[in-house]
Image (cartoon, rainbow, N blue to C red):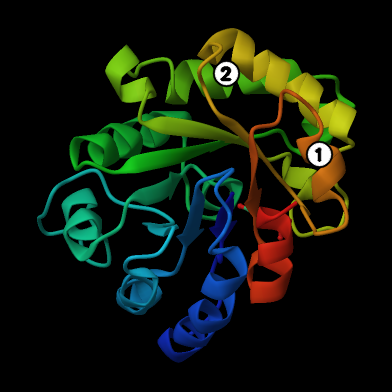
Amino acid sequence: MAANWKMYKTPAETKTFFENFLPLVKDAKHCEIAVCAPFVDLPAAIDAAAGSNVAIGGQNLYWAKEGAFTGEISGPMLKTLGCEWVIVGHSERRQYFGETDETVLKRTKAAIEAGLKVIVCVGELLAEREAGETEAVLEKQYAGGIAGLSAEEKAQIVIAYEPVWAIGTGKTATPEMAADAHRVIRKMAGADMRILYGGSVKPDNVTALMAQEEIDGALVGGASLDPVSFSKIVNF
Ligand code: 13P
């Protein structure tokens, strides 16, 4: 169960979140929990979550280890700070920041080399779904962004299926639609791959989504910003 805070919260708000959140999930033994926070909040998050059952992650990284890349953050930087996870290829990065399947693969390989586990995001646009292209889009994103990983590298990732039209819109894919897309991904990724669903996951729809055998977890945006709401999702 992973939180993607996107561009929300200050370090002080991060500290307050964890003070409230950790007691609510301390008995959750059924899942791994990760909170992916903005870069500037990571030290506060790592400090607050130390010794708990909650891991911390970044939301992006650059593929070089270091160098003249103004404004970028590397895998080794996240790892030495204490991150365990990083999100790669979120649709917002694909839509607004030029992320492609090719750069998804580069970032994912660099993250794994740095010792991070990766949440690799895929998902179709509304126009693509309406044109009946969902399966083709997922196959293309997998072929370009994930298939180039070795078996050892694949063991270090989870895939998040996030239909773009369901992100931040309040429109969730029905559990059946999500499961259909997960089956397409699983055919390529294999039985051992953990596949998360993301897109308007809330406390009141998480149980139906998680009841689908194909859905192994959730990547949660808006509803992860509130500690009570995210704890309800974790403890579905
Ligand atoms: P929402 O849960 O706000 O729809 O965001 C989903 C998402 O993009 C998680 O990465």
Near-viewer residue (7 or 82): 82
List the single residue furthest toward the left: 67
> Where does the image place residue 84, in percent across and percent down from the top left?
32, 51
User: Dividing the picture into quarters, in which one does residue 134 lie?
Assistant: top right
200 versus 71 height, above or below? above
Count residues near mark 2 (Cα–Cα under 10 Å), then give few for <14, some for 14-19, many for 20+: some
Secondary element under disc 2, as helix, strand or loop, is helix
User: Dividing the picture into quarters, in which one does residue 169 lie?
Assistant: bottom right
Q: In the rendered image, is residue 206 in sight?
A: yes
User: Dividing the picture into quarters, in which one does residue 225 lie?
Assistant: bottom right
Circle 1 residue: 209
Q: Say whether mark 1 is within 8 Å of ligand 1.
A: no
User: The disc labelled 1 sits on which kind of residue?
Assistant: Leu
Secondary element under disc 1, as helix, strand or loop, is helix
> Where does the image place residue 51, in percent across and percent down from the top left?
33, 65
Near-viewer residue (207 or 117): 207
Residue drawn at point x = 30 percent, y = 75 percent = 43
146 horizontally vs 138: left or right: left
96 horizontally vs 51: left or right: right
Could you tell me if the residues under marks 2 and 1 are in contact, i.e. CB atoms within 8 Å?
no
Count residues near mark 1 (Cα–Cα under 10 Å), then give few for <14, some for 14-19, many for 20+: many
Mark identifier at residue 125: none
Circle 2 residue: 140
Residue drawn at point x = 28 percent, y = 50 percent = 62
What is the CA distance from the residue labelled 2 to the residue labelled 1? 25 Å
Residue drawn at point x = 71 percent, y = 16 percent = 183
> Where does the image place residue 111, in percent across and percent down from the top left?
28, 41
Residue drawn at point x = 61 percent, y = 15 percent = 186
List the single residue furthest toward the bottom: 12
Q: In the rendered image, is residue 222 in sight?
A: no
Chain-order first, disc 2 or disc 1: 2
User: The disc labelled 2 sits on which kind of residue?
Assistant: Lys
